[in-house]
Image (cartoon, rainbow, N blue to C red):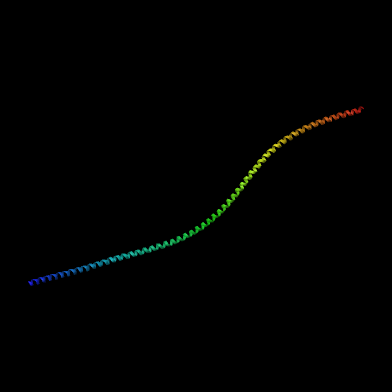
Amino acid sequence: MNSTKTQEMDREDEDEMAIYANADIVFNDDRRTRVKDSDTKRQRMLQIAGSVWSRMHGAAAVCLVLFCVLMTVIIVLRVQLSTETHNCQTEIKNFTEERNQLQKKYTDLEEKRNQLQKKYTDLEEKRNQLQNNYKEIKYERDQLQNNYTGIKYERDGLLNENTRLKNNVTQLAIKIAKLTEGRNSSNMINTTYTTSTYLYK
């Protein structure tokens, strides 16, 4: 009995030993596999890291080139902007001077306009005065025309009266001449009669 138990125990121990041995083998194989896998993973990681690094290096180079291009563009734009700003300031200065000149011309033209307006007002007043004077002169002319017409009428009347008086004077002169002739004849007759009477005595 005891030997049987001992044998069983020995078998169990041998089995345990075999199990442990197999476990060690499996563990060692697993460890070797893990180490191998770890090395493979490390190599892959190194490859990936190298690839990423090379990509990052290329990207950095591209970024540096782009940065240089961008800085060049910014500098060119800055120079152009500065030039355009200077040109704009010059144009603004020129426009300001032109505006001041135009303002001065506008002020001068406004003064001339005011002077012309004053002259126009004075001329208008003089025109009104001349028009009033013309009306007065026209009224006086009409009165003189009426007076002239009246005087002409009176002159015509006086001429007619003068003609009539001349005719009367002519007729009177004729009558006087006739009377003078008749008187002279009478005197001659009286003288002849007196002379003959004196002779006969």
74 left or right, relative to 143: left
Q: Could you say where residue 58 lies in the image, as x and y percent from the top left?
A: 32, 64
Q: Is residue 19 above or below residue 94?
A: below
> Residue 32's x, y, as percent?
20, 69
**In this orientation, which residue lies closer to the viewer: 163 or 141?**
141
Q: Which quadrant is the N terminus positioned in?
A: bottom left
Report the front residue among 18 and 55: 18
- Coordinates of residue 114 in the picture (x, y in percent): 57, 52
Total numbered labels placed on residues in the image: 0
Estimate the x, y position of residue 144 in percent, counting from the top left: 67, 41
Farthest-out residue, front: 1
| Nearest to the observer: residue 186 or residue 63 | 186
Q: Is residue 2 above or below residue 168?
A: below
Say left or right for 69 vs 189: left
Q: Identify the residue at the far left of this view.
A: 1
- Of residues 110 and 186, the one nearer the viewer is 110
